[in-house]
Each structure stands twice: as C-alpha cells, then as structure tokens.
Image (cartoon, rainbow, N blue to C red):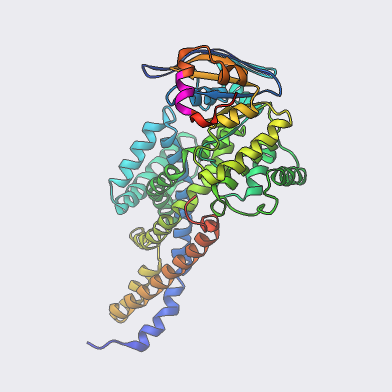
Amino acid sequence: MIKLTGITKSFGRNQVLKGIDLHVNKGEVVVILGPSGSGKTTLLRCINYLERPSDGQIVIGDSIVDCKRAGKQDILQLRRKSAMVFQQYNLFKHKTALENVMEGLVIVQKRPKEEARERSVQVLEKVGLGSKLDAYPSELSGGQQQRVGIARALALEPEVILFDEPTSALDPELVGEVLEVIRKIAKEGITMIVVTHEMGFARDVSNHVVFMDGGVIVEEGTPQEIFSSPKEERTKQFLKRITPEWSYTI
Amino acid sequence: MKLDVSFLLDVFPLLLSALPTTLLITAVSVSVGFVIGVVIASIRIYRVPYLYPIAVSYVTFIRGTPMLTHLFLIYFGLPLLVDGLASFAGLSFRAASIPLIWFAFISFSIMAGAYMSEVVRSGLLAVNRGQTEAAYAIGMNTWQALRRIVFPQAFATSLPILSNSVIGMLHGSTLAFTVSVVDINAKAQIVATTNWKFFEAYIAAAIIFWGLTIAIERITGHIEKRINRYNRGGVA
C-alpha cells in the first residue's frame, strides 16, 4: 500500500507540486495523466526521492517517511521498497542485460549470485529477452532496452513499480511490445504507478486514473469515470485534445 | 663529428641498468597520483564541505607551479619538517636517512594527483546522470552507486587521457636526477662523461624512452579495447 499525504515540491520559487494526496492499494494499477509541466513526473520521482519533496508524508508498506525530517536511512528504505522504469531506460551501459537485472539482487538485496542469476534469467524470459542475456544495452533496440529496464525493476520484487513515461522515447513501432509486457505484469497483481500519454493503455489496464494539472490533482476515479464522464472542465478539455475522435467508445 | 655507432650500441645495456629506477618512479607516482586524483575529483564533484576548498586550492597550487619546483620544495622542506617532528616526539629518526628516491616519489605523486584529479573529474562528469539515478532507484547507497556504476564508466572514459598522464610521468621522472637519483637520462649523462660522447648516449636514452612509450600506448590501447567492449554497438 502506498499513501502520499500533502506532498509539495518547489524548485526555487516555482512550486511544482501543491499538496498531493494519493492512495494506492496493493495490486492496483494507477495511471497519472496530465499535460506537460503538470508535475506528474516530479510526483513520481518524489516517491522514491529522486526529487526531495519540500513537505508531506510518504508511506510505502511499513515505511513511513516524513519529508521534512527524512534521513539517509529513510530514503534508502523508500528506494528499496520501490523500483523505477525510466523514460530513457537508463540501463547500466557497462553491464549486460543479465548483469543489469542481477545488480540490484546481488549488491542491494545481498542474495547469493546463483540464486540472483536464476531469478534474473527467469524475469528476462518473462519479458521475452531470454535470448539476449549477454547483450549490452548498446546492442539492443529501444524496446528491448526498456524491457530489460522493466525486468530490472520486476526482479527486485518491490512493493511498487514506478513507470515514468516508459514508452515516450520509443519508436512508434516498438511501443506495442513494451506496453504488452507492462500489461502482462499488471495482470499479475503488481502494484504500479504509471505516468503515460498512452490513453488506450490507461483505459484498458488501469484500475484508477489520476488527472493532474498545475501541480494539483484535478480529478481522479476509475478509467470509466475519467474517460467516459469526466466532471471537471479541465479534464474534458485535456481528453478532447489528446484523444482522436475516432477512438471514442460508447 | 662522426656518430660512434658502436659506442651507441654499447651504451644500451648500461642505460638499461637504470630502467628499474625510471619504471619505479613512474609506477609509484602514477598509482599514488591516481588514488589522490580519484579522491580529489570526488570531493570536488560532491562538493564535500570543508574538504572542497582544500581540494580546489591543492589543484590550482600544484598545477600553477613547475614540477621541478615541487621537487625542490619537498627536497629542502620535508627534512626540516621530519626532523622537527622527530625531535619534538623524542625520536632518533633523522631525515638524512630517507632514501633520495622517496623525495621523487612524494613530490611526483602529489603532482600527478593534481593533474589526474582533473582527468578523473572529466570522466565522472561524462557519466550520464540517469546512470546514478537508476542506481539509486534500485536501492543502492551513494558508495555502491559510485563503486559499481559511476567509477567503472568514468574510468573507461578517462583511459585515453590517463595514458597521457602515464607517459607524461614517465618523461617527467627524468627530473629526479636533480636530487641525485640516477634514472635512464641521468645514467646517459654519467656514461658519456667518460668519453664526451653525449650525443650517442642521449640518442640511446631517447630510443629507450620511445620504446617505453610505445609499450604504454599498446598496453592502454589493449585495456581500452577490453573495457569498452560495451560500446561496440555505438551510442546507447
């Protein structure tokens, strides 16, 4: 379970997050939508402290962190209970696909190498890269790299996986294979928070949709509620602009 | 004047007897300098409080003064310090018993540290911020992220310039003769004083240095190829 309470974040005088409350139940897939500059990526990065929130409280599982007083150990706890998939993949470029996935298991979780290898191979097979274990990131396509990124996160068995626009840097042709993998692991009941612009994906896969604008949550609800009968004017405006007419469903 | 080829050939084995000294000075200064360089570069990049200004002054002072001056500063200054400390602590140790080569080790290491810190720093800066973020995101602490992710990539990036530092140090080590350490170059001078065939002696010295440099180039080239295996696909 993840609970954010009153999260604020300012860069200098610019307040990017103006008090965000968000509750994510175990096994839920939450999609965060919003125009660029709405603070959705910043919010995601605050959860694992890649950005330090100015104020608020973060709860992941049994870790409760008060952002004003967060120490090194608190931050490490949050990071060890979460994992992240990046827009730019950020695979360790001097390590092979297998080593990328093993790294966290061996170095952070201190699991024995053999066990870590077995687990990593298994996860890489799940994302369809069983034949690319020894390939370096530079030898993989964008879609393959992102699937390794997903495997790296998945292998750690975190309480939550944070996806930061996982398909935005991909060739249109490769988006499908990555979404397919995310869809597959969503069905396994892994808690996920996904920032994305893929509306179809948001509609099909998520249990809960959050629409952000200007550093606040404008509206949230089930995909049905948000996509078919949005209440707020701003949400309607956004959906109209981002969803092509022909893909409206009744 | 005629080139005395047979003397030139005879000189080689004599000069090679000083090879261990040259190699030792180079190896010690480069190794110690590299460690100093990594520490200084990390202090500067992470802006460690208190240490940061010290690191910056160290680099500008050392880079702002000639290598030969450092050597003399250490040669004349260190004994005063050592003797002062020894008598203060009531020890019988005297600076006169320090082997001369140690002055070269110390001053050259300090110098190499300052220059190499900039090489290492450029390597560290070249590592994409996303690499560190990914390391943090899987739960690594700062030290694990540095050791496992950042340093290996920074090292690979700085390798070509590091080889430059090693070559520079090899050639710089000839200055040790000013504190009476007999390296290859000093040996050439000594050998030639017997018959005044300085030109032949220095040609021999030059050839040896060139050979050593080629060896260093070959070795780093080889290491580079191995380390940079992951880059074979081009940009990632």
Q: Quadrant of residue B204?
A: bottom left
Note whether residue B98 is visible: no
Q: Residue at x 36, y 68 (%)?
A: B186
Q: Nearer the viewer, residue B34 or A156?
A: A156
Residue placed furthest toward the left: B1
Percent across and percent down for residue B121 are 41, 44
Image location (x, y in percent) of residue A242: 47, 28
Position of B100 relative to A92 (above/below): below
The residue nearer to you, when weighing A70 against A167, is A167
Please state which of residues B90 and B147 is positioned toward the viewer in this rendering: B147
User: Would you say the magenta stretch is mainly helix, strand or loop?
Assistant: helix
Left or right relative to B35: residue B5: left
Residue B54 lies, in percent from the top left, at 38, 34
- Residue A179 in the image, given as x and y percentages of width and height: 61, 38
**Residue depicted at x 37% and y 42%:** B80
Q: Quadrant of residue A105?
A: top right
Region in magenta: A237-242
Residue pictured at 52% horizontal, 24% vertical: A33
**Is residue A3 positioned above or below B187 on the image?**
above
Q: Is residue A62 above or below residue B153?
A: above
Viewport quadrant of the N terminus of chain A: top right
Between A73 and A213, the one nearer to me in the picture:
A213
**Quadrant of the rendering where the C terminus of chain A is positioned:** top right
In this view of the protein, can residue B34 be seen by the observer? yes
Q: Is residue B52 magenta?
A: no
Above-or-below relation of B90 to A47:
below
